[in-house]
């Protein structure tokens, strides 16, 4: 086990230290894992000092669904608006690298690979899973994802159409 947090399968952990916020994704990350991350981190962005950094440790992440990838894009945009910084994706696994590359996000997001493990804050806490994240959350993350490229727009347009219909009650 690496210091600074438990290695619970399929989890997102959040911690903070003098550098800023660190998020750690472990295992298969889907919409039900990442909803609470948005709920907890987005309000923090409103009041975070501009010098804080935002790190996403992907060294233990073996799968990212499109909702999580869309949330990464939305987080990066929001971080940039509130302090001019970027979300830094640290040490992604080959699976994560491949997922980001297939969507062209390796050209958009800040991805850093280092020779050693990313230093985690001492106190990392696991965020809770959500049984059923709402269609609105999934819609918003896919909207952010679709804004990144023509290939992403084409790939997720049907998902967006179905979610929009669900929200309208059709």
Image: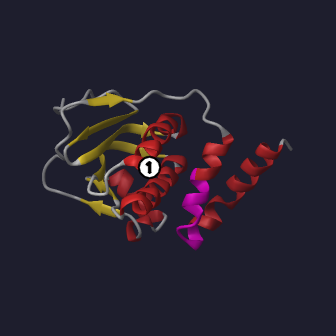
Residue 130 located left or right of residue 3: right
Residue 150 falls inside the magenta stretch: yes
Q: Quadrant of residue 99?
A: bottom left
Residue at x-position 40% and y-position 57%: 79
Quadrant of the image containing the C terminus: top right
Q: Would you place residue 118 above or below residue 125 in this image?
A: below
Residue 106: image location, x then y, percent: 38, 66
120 and 9: which is toward the camera: 120
Q: How many residues crowd mark 1 within 10 Å: few (<14), some (14–19), many (20+)?
A: few
Residue 1 located left or right of residue 104: left
Q: Would you place residue 16 above or below residue 56 in this image?
A: above
Residue at x-position 49% and y-position 64%: 103
Q: Main secondary structure of the magenta part?
A: helix
On the image, numbered disc 1 is attached to which residue? 46
Residue 51 located left or right of residue 130: left
Residue 137: image location, x then y, percent: 61, 44
Element type where label 1 sits in the image: helix
Which residues fall within the magenta stretch? 141-151
110 and 47: which is toward the camera: 47
Residue found farthest to the right:
170
Residue at x-position 41% and y-position 43%: 44
Residue at x-position 60% and y-position 54%: 142
The answer to whether any part of residue 10 appears in the image is yes
């Amino acid at each position: 086990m690496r210091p600074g947090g438990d290695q619970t399968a399929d989890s997102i952990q959040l911690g903070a230290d003098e550098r800023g916020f660190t998020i750690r994704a472990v295992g298969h990350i889907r919409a039900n894992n990442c909803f609470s991350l948005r709920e907890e981190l987005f309000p923090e962005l409103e009041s975070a000092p501009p010098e804080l950094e935002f790190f996403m440790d992907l060294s233990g992440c073996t799968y990212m669904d499109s909702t999580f990838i869309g949330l990464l894009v939305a987080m990066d945009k929001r971080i940039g608006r509130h302090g001019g910084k970027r979300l830094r994706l640290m040490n992604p696994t080959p699976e994560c690298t491949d997922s980001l590359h297939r969507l062209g996000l390796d050209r958009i997001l800040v991805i850093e690979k280092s020779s050693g493990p990313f230093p985690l804050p001492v106190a990392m806490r696991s965020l809770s899973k959500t049984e059923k994240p709402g269609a609105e959350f999934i819609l918003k993350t896919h909207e952010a994802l679709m804004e990144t490229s023509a290939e992403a727009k084409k790939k997720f347009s049907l998902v967006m159409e179905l979610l929009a219909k669900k929200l309208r009650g059709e």
